[in-house]
């Protein structure tokens, strides 16, 4: 049985060999990226069993991604290759301060071949949490239908729905995102969101107001990500403000939110207190930004223990 299953597109990410504007960068390194896959990797490294539903191009890049995911211990039984649709790409621009811009080449995404009928009900029966994001919805409007079907199957079999709006404005407009993602909120059990995203969807930036509106939608567990300011969470009638965990150096911010999400889901599944879960998730986020790449910085459980001082680090 998988602890967490997720649906979404993965891409080959080309990381720059130097910092600065992309037009002046001459070398790139091939890596793997994608919010949902990053989440699955983050969960797997913490010790959870994670499954990923997707489609990849029947090409060398697609084969590389599937092999990579399998190597991370992810269940890829619901990942298929399709002909005529090249595996999506993105190129990253990283500035000296760690700020990142992403340039997508995913107009003919292999996931465009997916339909609601492709979801295997039995796969949902053997899981605990369904994690979905706004990235998959933003790739193509019809993907909302797939997510709605996934939500129905999850509800039918008692899975909790975890949702990160993860709005990518290079994929769609604020208005399109609000219209599509607002329909998902009433079905959500665990909301993992940034302030800017909730401002688009709810018209609220204040974490307490976001929590209040989330409660009105029936959401029982909320974690509002505030980056360098930490996080604010809600569960069992309690609001907790979690102090930030400072990173020694910020190299690349991509993947920090996915790592945070994995930490929250780990704490949720292990019935941890909200305070402990938020500290754990914040610590993971601070570890991810110290490493270049979308998922290279996602830590293993023992790495987080060492960072928290719960386990001694032996270097030699």
Image (cartoon, grey):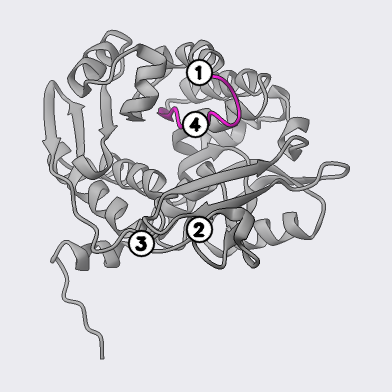
Q: Which residues are magenta?
A: 160-173
Badge 2 crowding class, 10 Å Cα cut-off, few under 14, some 14 to 19, many 20 or more, is some
* Marks 2 and 1, how far apart at CA: 28 Å
Q: Which mark is residue 174?
A: 1
Residue 180 picture quarter: top right
Which residue is under mark 2? 20
- Residue at x 17% of width, y 46% of height: 244
Asked if residue 163 is among those painted magenta in the image, a careful observer would answer yes
Asked if residue 175 is among those painted magenta in the image, a careful observer would answer no
Q: Earlier in the sequence, mark 3 or mark 4?
A: 4
Task: Out of 200 and 119, give the one closest to the viewer.
Answer: 200
Badge 1 crowding class, 10 Å Cα cut-off, few under 14, some 14 to 19, many 20 or more, is some
Q: Is residue 226 left or right of residue 162?
A: left
Q: Nearer the viewer, mark 2 or mark 1?
A: 2
Q: Is residue 195 left or right of residue 157?
A: left
Q: Which mark is residue 299?
A: 3
Q: Position of residue 277 (x, y in %)?
A: 21, 44
Contact between marks 2 and 4 (CB within 8 A): the answer is no
Which residue is under mark 4? 132
Q: Earlier in the sequence, mark 2 or mark 4?
A: 2
- Residue at x 26% of width, y 91% of height: 316
Q: Secondary structure at mark 2?
A: loop
């Amino acid at each position: 049985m998988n602890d967490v299953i997720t649906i979404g597109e993965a891409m080959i990410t080309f990381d720059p060999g130097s910092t600065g504007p992309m037009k002046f960068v001459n070398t790139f390194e091939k890596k793997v990226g994608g919010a949902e896959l990053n989440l699955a990797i983050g969960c797997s490294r913490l010790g959870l069993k994670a499954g990923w539903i997707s489609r990849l191009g029947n090409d060398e890049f697609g084969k590389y991604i599937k092999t990579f995911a399998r190597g991370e211990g992810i269940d890829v039984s619901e990942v298929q290759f399709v002909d005529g649709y090249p595996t999506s790409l993105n190129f990253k621009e990283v500035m000296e301060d760690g700020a990142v811009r992403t340039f997508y080449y995913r107009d003919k995404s292999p996931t465009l071949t997916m339909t609601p009928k492709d979801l295997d009900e039995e796969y949902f029966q053997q899981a605990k949490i369904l994690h979905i994001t706004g990235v998959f919805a933003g790739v193509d409007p019809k993907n909302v239908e797939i997510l709605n079907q996934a939500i129905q199957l999850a509800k039918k079999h008692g899975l909790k729905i975890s949702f990160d709006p993860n709005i990518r404005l290079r994929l769609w407009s604020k208005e399109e995102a609000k219209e599509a993602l607002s329909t998902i909120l009433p079905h959500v059990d665990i909301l993992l969101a940034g302030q800017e995203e909730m401002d688009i969807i709810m018209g609220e930036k204040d974490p307490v107001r976001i929590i209040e509106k989330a409660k009105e939608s029936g959401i029982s567990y909320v974690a509002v990500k505030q980056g360098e300011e930490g996080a604010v969470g809600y569960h069992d009638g309690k609001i907790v403000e979690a102090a930030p965990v400072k990173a020694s150096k910020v190299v690349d911010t991509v993947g920090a939110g996915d790592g945070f999400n994995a930490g929250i889901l780990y704490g949720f599944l292990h019935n941890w207190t909200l305070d402990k879960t938020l500290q754990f998730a914040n610590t993971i986020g601070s570890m991810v930004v110290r490493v270049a790449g979308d998922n290279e910085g996602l830590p293993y459980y023992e790495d987080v223990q060492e960072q928290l001082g719960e386990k001694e680090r032996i270097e030699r």
